[in-house]
Image: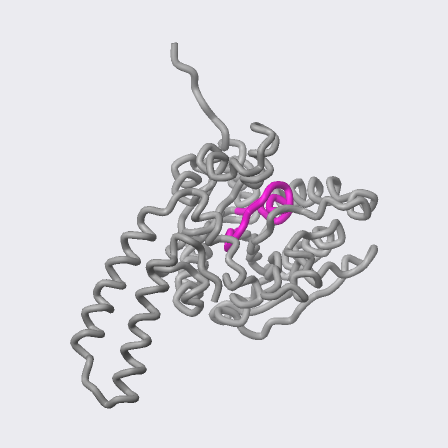
Amino acid sequence: MQRWDFEKPIVELEDKIEELKKFSAEKEVNLSSEIKDFEKKLVKLKKEVYSNLTPWQKVQISRHPHRPTTLDYINLILSDFIPIHGDRLFGDDKALITGFAKLDGRKVAVIGHQKGKDINENIERNFGCAHPEGYRKAIRVMRLAERFNMAILCFIDTPGAYPGLGAEERGQAQAIAENIRDMFLIKVPIIVVVIGEGGSGGALGIGVGDRVLILEYSYYSVISPEGCAAILWKDASKKEEASAVLKLTSKDLLSLGLIDAIISEPQGGAHRHYQETANNLKQALLEQLKSINCTAEELVVARYEKFRKIGDFSEGK
């Protein structure tokens, strides 16, 4: 599995533990005491490393090639998934997954960006960068969910919407804008979760919800750190500095009131602990759905007011 630079001390210690276990088994030597000591050191080291991550390091974790995707969470926490394809206008966008499923027996609609786990799948999925037909497919499924009174779960994981010429010719900006507008009018609960990258309008195209949650090591931003650095300093290599000033981490977003809750990840990140992360996500979804108790009309008004409050500020003398 790929490791980032800041994870190297952890990897070295993990490798040492595996070597001791292998040696103990092959030579029939009891090294349980030594192994236990190293495992205690590993727990302490993980805590030190992951409690002091910089914003850029958190961005790196959010982009890990083995981080769980929308399809992974569908398989881990939902049942009876039925995919829906196509926007009935142009085609099917594989960068956006849509369909219907059950969450603990409750029927829900599921919409989420989908990245690949290798280069071939990433090319097929366009690296999670959706085209306008993807956003039109998403709102089509949302309207179906509204018709059948199903809650909607949106999983965000994209560096941004696809900026290519073909996407622009087919109305990329308009598709995203219409989704943002129409999601305010959907009369069923919408829970949005940032599970990896939450970049720009590509994220906002499925990002309007009654509750907006984020996994601990995910980020949500108007632009990528590299893009921000290229614009502000004409130097994309200043991405670490940009990550800090963008206030894009889960803790920053919660303090600014841009999200409602943080879903904790196991030490080491979701890419190392799929099932535990999925369990945390499932519990959060169930709690948030249970907390929404209002009429359809009240729901729409509350959603509107929620987003109108974002960006409120006062000036001191």
- Counting from the top left corner in percent of width and height, residue 172 is at 75, 44
- Counting from the top left corner in percent of width and height, residue 160 is at 63, 46
Residue drawn at point x = 37 percent, y = 55 percent: 264
> Would you place residue 270 above or below residue 169 in this image?
below
Q: Is residue 204 magenta?
A: yes
> Would you place residue 14 above or below residue 192 in this image?
below
Count every numbered label the image shows and give the total: 0
Decide if residue 125 is on the left or right side of residue 39: right
Q: Quadrant of the C terminus?
A: top left
Q: Is residue 211 magenta?
A: no
Residue drawn at point x = 50 percent, y = 35 percent: 242
Would you identify the image quadrant in which residue 137 lies? Answer: bottom right
- Could you tell me if residue 17 is visible in this image? yes
- Counting from the top left corner in percent of width and height, residue 282 is at 44, 63
Would you identify the image quadrant in which residue 54 lies? Answer: top left
- Counting from the top left corner in percent of width and height, residue 170 is at 82, 46
Task: Work out whether residue 239 or residue 220 is closer to the camera in this orientation and state it.
Answer: 239
Task: Work out whether residue 24 or residue 270 is closer to the camera in this orientation and state it.
Answer: 24
Residue drawn at point x = 61 percent, y = 44 percent: 204
- Could you tell me if residue 293 is visible in this image? no
Would you identify the image quadrant in which residue 119 lies? Answer: bottom right
Task: Work out whether residue 127 or residue 70 is closer to the camera in this orientation and state it.
Answer: 127
Q: Which residues are magenta?
A: 192-209
Decide if residue 169 is on the left or right side of residue 46: right
